[in-house]
Amino acid sequence: MRQSISTRYLGATNTRGSRVKARSSSGLSVTLPYDHEYDANTNHTRAAEALAREFGWVGRWVAGGAEDGRGNVYVQDDGDGFTVGK
């Protein structure tokens, strides 16, 4: 079954730092702390990749910006290995 993953930036609160949440079309999710050593796009890609790896979803992934500008959308494509790119 092919999956899609959407990512969203979650700003800091009084108790948590900034994070990026990746959620699959099947409802599974992971949340990673925002790593300020990387740019925003890399943080979103890392979260999507972490979710795919956790559930063993291998293949080629292609990405595009989400309509609201707060994240990305990744869709599974045919191919070998695991790559994320535009």
Image: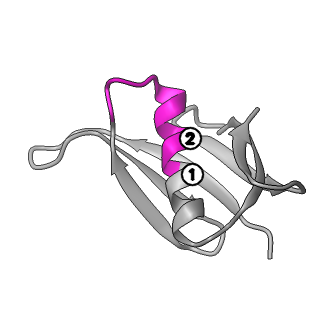
Q: Which mark is residue 10?
A: none
Q: Quadrant of residue 13?
A: top left
**Secondary structure at numbered mark 2:** helix
Q: Are marks 2 and 1 in contact (CB under 8 Å)?
A: yes
Label annotation for residue 49: 1
Indicate the amino acid at tag 2. Answer: Thr
Q: Which of 68 and 3 lies nearest the eye of the viewer?
A: 3
Q: Residue 40 at x, y = what percent? A: 47, 27
Q: Residue furthest left?
A: 14
Say left or right for 21 vs 33.
right
Q: Is residue 66 above or below residue 75?
A: above
The dominant secondary structure in magenta is: helix
Q: Which residues are magenta?
A: 35-47
Q: Position of residue 37 (x, y in %)?
A: 34, 23
Q: Residue furthest right?
A: 78
Q: Residues within 10 Å of mark 2 (few under 14, many from 20)?
A: many
Amino acid type, callout 1 = Glu
State the residue at coordinates (71%, 45%): 83
Separation of residues labelled 2 and 1 (CA atoms) = 6 Å
- Does residue 41 lie above or below 47 as drawn? above
Measuring from the top left, give residue 38's x and y in whole percent.
41, 25
Toward the viewer: 42 or 10? 42
The residue that label 2 is drawn on is 45
Task: Out of 78 and 29, give the one closest to the viewer.
Answer: 78
Q: Quadrant of the C terminus?
A: top right
> Considering the numbered disc 1 on the image, is that residue within a helix, a strand or a loop?
helix
Q: Which quadrant of the figure has residue 19?
A: top left
Instruction: Indicate yes or no whether the magenta region holds residue 50.
Output: no
